[in-house]
Every structure is written in structure tokens, then in C-alpha cells.
């Protein structure tokens, strides 16, 4: 009897813990067209949005001509969504499809987070993010919610000097940050200069905490969950705030890319 009571109590604790974790996660349901899902744009764009807001959308892939229950935002190549609360053309693809972002108008916390995503995607930063996606050197999408002059005009709001200090402190354990300080890094990890030479360097730095092996030892305040107590970090953890990450991005944006002799083929 006592054993059953303990097992029941343990199950209740796990259920409550899971419920609290789910309640703390900020999310919304984003419906996207199959061709958009297969383009890679979402993998490029959504981590940037999550980095700044802590909001992680749950993506549903389907051909949508209307919203179903529980769906907050539609990002599809059509604007005639019945019952839509708000619709705006946000970008076109290379085949001439015009993608519209539609807020479904459903109530709830997800709708509020969906509105935050809509605001971000229509903003100058969101539009430049779309225009910057060029996996093979050629842009696949054209931003249409506003005028985007050049991708090079993206400015990272941070202090490059502070970013250099943070990079050397936290990243210099594995990467060569300053070419003049080559010792102490791991030979199997690329230098900052080599990473800067990659076409998607900004994505790699903005979302590094989600790219292996970093999740096992990196915490970004307000973005990543705490480490599992049963699986402690293998090395001294890296703990950063979003402001500190902005400093690192500003530092890397101003540094010269390494001359590797040929374009980098990254995967």
C-alpha cells in the first residue's frame, strides 16, 4: 500500500513539473506551406526570432486555405483566408509565389505570441533576415513588407570591445578568437576567422547555443532551459545573456574573415 502511494505521489510530482515547464514555455502554432517548409528558410529565420524573444513556434506543415482550431498564424502563398484578423504580404519566392502572414484572430496566449512574430517579421530586422537567406550564394526570397536596401546594412546592437572580451573568455577555450592567441584552443574547432568566412556565419553565431556540441554546456538567460540535474555539463558551463550575445555578434561582424583560398562548403 505504501509503495503504491509513493509511486502515485511520484507520478503526481512529475506531472506537475511537466505542467509548469509547459506553462513557462512561450510558443504559438505556426502553419506553413509545404514548399516553404522544404526551403530551409524557417531553419534560418526562427532561431533568430527565438533568440530575441524567447518564443519558439510549433510548426505545422500543410496546404492551408483556412485556420483550424488552435492555429495562431498562417504563413502561406495566399491572402484569402476566411475569418482572418490581419493579413499582410511579407515576402515572395523565386518562383513568383507571394507569401502572406495571417493572424487567425483566435484568443489565447498563443495568439499574443503569434502577433509578436508578425511584428518581428514585418520589421526591418525580420525583412532583412528573409532577404539574407542565400544558402548557395543566391537569395531565394525577396522581402516585400518594406524596403530592404542591402543585407550589409544589418547592424548588431552591441559593443565590439566587450564582445572581444567575452569571446576570448568563453569561446577561446575551444576556438581561436584572436589570431595572435592561437594556443589553448582545440585543433578540431574552427577559428572565428574561418567561421566568419562562411556565408551563414551570422546564423552560426546567433544560434550557436542550439548547434552541437554547445547545448550540453551552454545557457542563454531566458532562452535555454536549465541543465538536467541527472546530466550535468561535461565542462565548465558557458552562461550568457542576450545582451552579451549581442556584444559578441557586434565583435564578429567587424572582424575580417580568414582567407581560406576558396569558398567554404559548409553543411
Image (tube, rainbow, N blue to C red):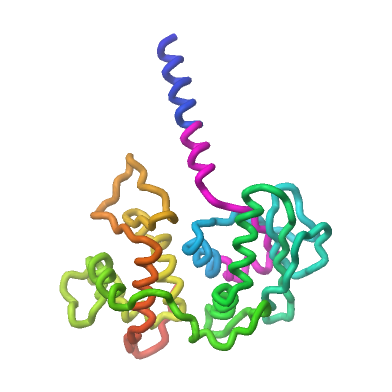
Q: Residue at left 41%, top 49%?
A: 225
Residue farthest to the top? Answer: 1
| Quadrant in the picture for the C terminus | bottom left
| Viewer-proximal residue among 207 and 103 | 103
| Residue 211 position by quadrant | bottom left
Q: Position of residue 196 (x, y in %)?
A: 37, 80
| Residue 235 position by quadrant | bottom left
Residue 14 left/right relative to 83:
left
| Quadrant in the picture for the N terminus | top left
Residue 262 among magenta residues? no
What segment carries the magenta color? 16-42
Q: Is residue 54 above or below residue 101?
A: above
Whether residue 188 is visible here, answered yes or no, is no
Whether residue 160 is visible here, answered yes or no, is yes
| Viewer-proximal residue among 224 and 263 | 224
| Viewer-proximal residue among 51 and 34 | 51
Q: Residue at left 54%, top 56%?
A: 56
Q: Is residue 167 above or below residue 256?
A: above
| Residue 213 position by quadrant | bottom left
Circle count = 0
Q: Residue at left 44%, top 56%?
A: 223
Residue 189 left/right relative to 264:
left
Residue 251 left/right relative to 123:
left
Residue 40 among magenta residues? yes
Residue 30 left/right relative to 231:
right
Q: Position of residue 105 (x, y in %)?
A: 74, 55
Q: Residue at left 72%, top 73%?
A: 89
Q: Position of residue 194 (x, y in %)?
A: 33, 80
Q: Position of residue 98 (x, y in %)?
A: 73, 75
Amino acid at each position: 500500500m505504501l509503495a503504491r502511494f509513493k509511486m502515485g505521489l511520484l507520478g503526481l510530482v512529475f506531472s506537475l513539473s511537466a505542467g509548469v515547464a509547459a506553462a513557462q514555455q512561450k510558443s504559438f502554432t505556426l502553419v506553413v506551406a509545404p514548399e516553404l517548409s522544404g526551403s530551409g528558410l524557417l531553419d534560418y529565420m526562427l532561431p533568430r526570432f527565438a533568440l530575441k524573444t524567447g518564443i519558439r513556434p510549433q510548426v505545422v506543415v500543410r496546404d492551408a486555405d483556412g485556420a483550424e482550431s488552435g492555429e495562431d498564424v498562417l504563413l502561406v502563398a495566399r491572402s484569402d483566408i476566411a475569418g482572418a484578423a490581419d493579413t499582410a504580404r511579407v515576402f515572395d519566392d523565386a518562383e513568383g509565389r507571394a507569401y502572406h502572414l495571417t493572424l487567425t484572430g483566435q484568443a489565447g496566449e498563443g495568439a499574443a505570441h503569434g502577433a509578436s512574430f508578425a511584428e518581428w517579421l514585418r520589421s526591418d530586422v525580420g525583412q532583412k533576415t528573409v532577404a539574407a537567406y542565400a544558402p548557395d550564394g543566391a537569395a531565394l526570397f525577396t522581402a516585400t513588407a518594406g524596403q530592404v536596401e542591402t543585407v550589409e546594412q544589418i547592424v548588431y546592437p552591441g559593443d565590439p570591445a566587450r564582445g572581444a572580451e567575452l569571446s576570448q573568455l568563453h569561446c577561446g577555450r575551444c576556438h581561436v578568437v584572436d589570431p595572435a592567441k592561437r594556443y589553448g584552443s582545440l585543433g578540431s574547432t574552427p577559428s572565428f576567422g574561418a567561421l566568419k568566412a562562411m556565408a551563414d556565419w551570422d546564423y552560426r553565431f546567433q544560434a550557436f547555443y542550439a548547434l552541437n556540441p554547445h547545448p550540453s554546456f551552454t545557457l542563454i538567460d531566458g532562452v535555454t532551459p536549465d541543465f538536467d540535474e541527472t546530466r550535468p555539463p561535461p565542462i565548465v558551463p558557458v552562461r550568457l545573456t542576450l545582451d552579451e550575445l549581442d556584444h559578441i555578434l557586434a565583435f564578429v561582424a567587424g572582424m575580417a574573415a580568414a582567407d581560406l583560398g576558396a569558398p567554404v562548403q559548409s553543411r
